[in-house]
Amino acid sequence: MIDRSATVHPDADVDASATIGARSTVGRRADVRPGAVIGSHTDVGGDVLVDEGVTIGDGVQVERGALLYRGVTIADAVFIGPGAILTNDRYPRAVTSSGELASAAAPPTPVALEEGCSVGAGAVIVAGVTVGRYATVGAGAVVTRDVSSHALVVGSPAHRIGWVCACGARLVDADGHPAEAVPPPYAAHRELSCSSCDRVYAYIPDAETLEERPGPRQRTPA
């Protein structure tokens, strides 16, 4: 079902069983396959593949040429850069051990992108991975394991180099330097802060993630 307020380019291929929410857009030559669900206020760019059964939340931006394969679930307010690929088979083979053609109907290994996270241009998210809330995956990264909420990861295989705010800016330590991947355990002030929106976070070692904290940023005394 396509909401009457949605905009679908005439050159897009949208299956009749797909769902497209209010005020969403689907670009030129996009391929939206059976059972796919696209939420409201979501922008799916040109040449994007939204495979069978893929679920996309509200307020999502999927840039041109991204490939979202079966088994992918995308929460609200996620950004997916141009040419990003979200896979669904951890150990792909064209044929089975008996030499038969592998079935495309085999259960996929899911990928989940949680609320507010961003996946950079050309990044690859390998099957079975979850990218946490407000995390950022750098352009061209190859993500082979779960990404913690608010983590900034780059490279192949992707590794954490720091932390990002809910607004997307890189977080800094009490001295104003980009926060390390693992904040020093004996620092005088372990809070991480955002110079853009003044949010403050605390590092949670056991979970390897951040927790937002109320109140002003603590600074090192002069």
Image (cartoon, grey):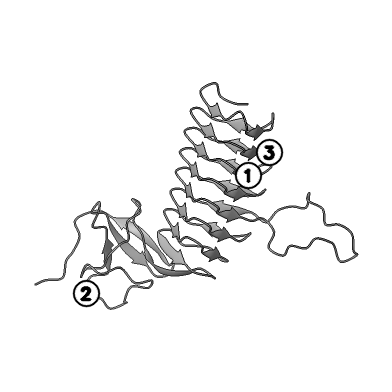
Residue placed under numbered mark 1 in the picture: 49
Asked whether, in this view, residue 196 is left or right of residue 83, the answer is left
Q: Residue furthest top?
A: 4
Left or right, 219 with reference to 147: left
| Residue 35, label in figure | none
Q: Which label sits in the foreground, 1 or 3?
A: 1
Out of 200 and 136, give the one closest to the viewer: 136
> Residue at position x 70%, y 53% from top?
108
Image coordinates for residue 103, horizontal then vertical, percent: 82, 53
* Residue 141 left/right relative to 108: left
- Viewer-nearest of labels 1 and 2? 1
Label 3: few (<14), some (14–19) or many (≥20) C-alpha neighbours in 10 Å: many
Q: Earlier in the sequence, mark 1 or mark 3?
A: 3
Residue under numbered circle 3: 33
Q: Amino acid at mark 2?
A: Ala
Single out the residue that lies furthest toward the left.
Answer: 222
Where is residue 12? Give x, y as percent: 62, 34
